[in-house]
Amino acid sequence: MKIFRAMRFFRFLTTARPRILGGAYSGPTRVNVSSIPGGAVLHLDHFLFYLVLELAEQFTEDPETIGDQLREIDALSNPREDSHAEHQRDRLVDELLDQLGGTHLRLHGPQVKRVAELLLSSNGAGTVIALPRQREAGAA
């Protein structure tokens, strides 16, 4: 009975946990890709690290403005009966992200190819299968 449970637990670990396939390190931002059942995970911790550093720098330069923006976003995150608060909060978050430069992750040169390869291979989709060509008339 214990062996059966251990086997089920091992099967769960191998299917539920992301399996790191590799990373793309040649661009300005490091990107790692993991395989999960039914898809892939992009690890953007390096990108978010620099986004938080930019937020801290802007906070140091102008604590009142950034602090007010964050307080307003927090206040709109817990709306009571105002249905427009959520839309206003989303707009404020978008504006803050634009201000920080964190709305786009830029990939350059070979990094684009590497991320594409990792994403395609995440669930075996990157396996190339040769399809037979149709024969020309008279060729046998």
Image (cartoon, rainbow, N blue to C red):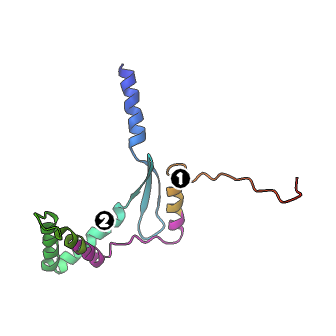
Name, please, the residue furthest toward the top. 1
The residue to which callout 2 is attached is 49
Residue span colored magenta:
92-113
Q: Residues within 10 Å of mark 1 (few under 14, many from 20)?
A: some
Asked whether 8 falls inside the magenta stretch, the response is no
Disc 1 marks a residue whose amino acid type is Ser
Q: Residues within 10 Å of mark 2 (few under 14, many from 20)?
A: few
Disc 2 marks a residue whose amino acid type is Phe
Q: Is residue 137 left or right of residue 92?
A: right
Name the residue: 14% across, 67% down. Answer: 74
Which numbered marker is on residue 31?
none
Label 2 SS: helix
Question: At which x and y percent is residue 98?
Answer: 30, 77
Question: For the N terminus, which image quadrant?
Answer: top left
Which numbered marker is on residue 121?
1
Name the residue: 34% across, 72% down. Answer: 103
Q: Within the image, what quadrant is residue 62 found in?
A: bottom left
